[in-house]
Amino acid sequence: MEVNKQFSAKAKHDFKLIQSAVEGGDEKAYAELMQIYKKPVYHVVLKMVRNPDDAEDLTIEAFAKAFRNLHKFNPEYAFSTWLFRIATNNCIDFIRKNKIKTMSIDSAIKIDNGDEITIDFKDNNLTPQESAIKNQKIEIMQFIVGKLPEKYQRLVTLRYFDELSYEEIATELNAPLGTVKAQLHRARELLYDMVKNKKHLI
DNA sequence: CGGGTAGATTACCATGATTC
DNA sequence: GAATCATGGTAATCTACCCG
């Protein structure tokens, strides 16, 4: 592990610790790294989640992840940079998870590929006209899909209206399969979101 | 039943945009 | 110019279903 000369003494010290941690399995080195960075990481995390309990958890998680992957650490960058990125990414994922959890309680949308598209609205302004709305579900569906970012429109159209397989879509769009899967997943996420917050529809 | 597979979800990370 | 947060790509993993 060659240390870049332009790093500060502090950063160099970090590298030493990392080295003895990862190569020598030195418990103390781990402890010291944690000691040094625990507070800063905690504060970063806390700012993102605005909840001390979650911040505690996420801080520990971040360290766990970082240490688990210490051998993959690229010494081209300062350790702090790397650590913070792990911490923030972890937070982002956490926040995402929570967002999903809190929605889809008062609204549900279901898409399956048997040519059936159903949308259920279940919130306070339930009216006798609700059934009428349901009759227009496909139109609504197309309307909502029309509001998606173009990228996703394409995906959703191919998948749910043209009924192509993931692989076919991947070929069609010349994109990796994993990308197609993830993007479609996100498109669905967006749809849920839109149905929930109807303001987005206008 | 079990293993094969399409599809769905999740983890991980990089980069971009925005704000301070 | 760093801090903060969003968005996106990729791959691994999980799940449900089918067919033998």
Image: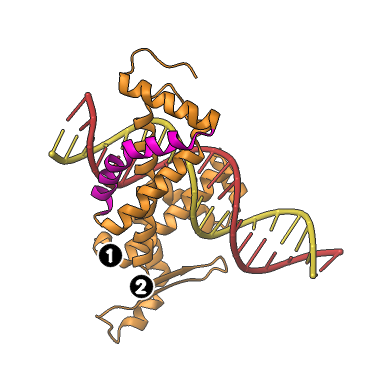
Chain colours: A orange, B yellow, C red
Image point 51% across, 71% down: which residue? A116
Image point 37% across, 20% down: which residue? A12
Residue A4 place in picture, x, y as percent? 40, 15
User: Which chain hosts label 2?
Assistant: A
Q: Which of marks 1 and 2 is nearer the N terminus?
A: 2
User: Which chain hosts label 1?
Assistant: A
Viewer can see residue A35: yes
Q: Dot 1: what SS?
A: loop
Q: In which quarter of the image is residue A197?
A: bottom left
Q: Which of A53 and B4 is in front in this view?
A: A53
Which image quadrant: the C terminus of chain A? bottom left
Classify A32 as above or below A182: above
Disc 1 target residue: A197
A39 drawn magenta: yes
- How many numbered marks appear? 2
Q: Main secondary structure of the magenta part?
A: helix
A113 drawn magenta: no
Magenta residues, as a range? A25-49
Q: Dot 2: what SS?
A: strand
Check disc 2 and give the amino acid type: Ser
Image point 35% across, 48% down: which residue? A59
Disc 2 target residue: A107
